[in-house]
Image (spheres, helix red, strand yellow):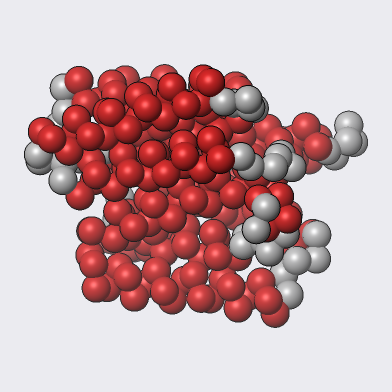
Amino acid sequence: MLIGALLPLLLMFFGVNIVTVLLVGLGQAHFVHCYVYQYRAGKMDADFFAKWVFGLTSAGAACFYLGDDVMIPAALVFILHQFFDDMYLYRKSTSRTDYIQLGLVLMACATIAVFEEHTIARQIAAAAMLLSFGIGLIAKERHIFWTLSLPFGVPLLYVLWNYQQGDWLIPLGIIIVSHYLRWLIYVYQSRNDAQKPMFFTEALILNAMFVLYAVATVSGQYNEMLSMALQGLFSLQAFVIWTMAHIASTIRPRWMKTTGF
């Protein structure tokens, strides 16, 4: 878990463009891989498709009305998704300090995303994350500190040191990539020895989607048909739509049993 949470921190030195390419490209591979496992588990029933279509259409409407600003609510929804997904995957009950850290991360993300041109917003975001660090360090269990506060807070404080417009996407992208990586590690470790080679091969093939996107993005040399395909799969607004469909399809009522609700 710690490797998956901390390894993506290295991305904070590569800038917003590289982080965006990584989160979007690897994201599509993650979505498809999750669908493969949901299908094998027999979870692709009417309820699954209803949730998937709801996520797809609601995100599509949000993109239509909000344009590029859709990234802000989408970022907050993702942070909530990671929080509750961690609770489910690691079978961890939540505490008050977990929710306080979650609230501080949401506040930091929303403040810097909405008011990034104001110095006071950056100060509020930095203060929120430092407070989250402190609470995480004194908490009885530090699960959320390692999987949310630290992977978001360290790159946020780094970019705030010399902030440029749009840099708030760097800490967001890093926790998203961390989410993907930790899912891969979790599922790989949960397979038996006979299943592990197949899982590794599937992950390798699906992440080739990212290679295609990365090469096309960096080179900028591709024909009109490929350009349309890339926009439909990998533009930021398209990524928001596919992300919300994925998140909606993974909503589990059982999370309430582990969160005390």
From the top left corner, tell me how far across and down residue 152 is, in percent.
Answer: 40, 32
Q: Residue at x 22, y 65 (%)?
A: 67
Quadrant location of the N terminus in the rendered image: top right
Which residue in the rendered view is the most extreme toward the left?
118
Q: Report if residue 213 is visible in the image.
A: no
Q: Residue at x 56, y 40 (%)?
A: 96
At a point 43% along the width and 55% down the height, the residue shown is 77
Q: Relative to 61, is 196 above or below?
A: above
* 59 w.r.t. 157: above or below: below
Quadrant for residue 123, please give it: top left
Q: What percent of the width, then of the height, locates residue 90?
A: 71, 39
Residue 196 location (% of width, % of height)? 81, 35
Across and down, in percent, residue 11 comes to 39, 25
Q: Is residue 46 visible?
A: yes
Residue at the image point whose x is 61% and y is 34% from the top? 182
Q: Nearer the viewer, residue 222 or 132?
A: 132
Relative side of 49 to 110, left or right: right
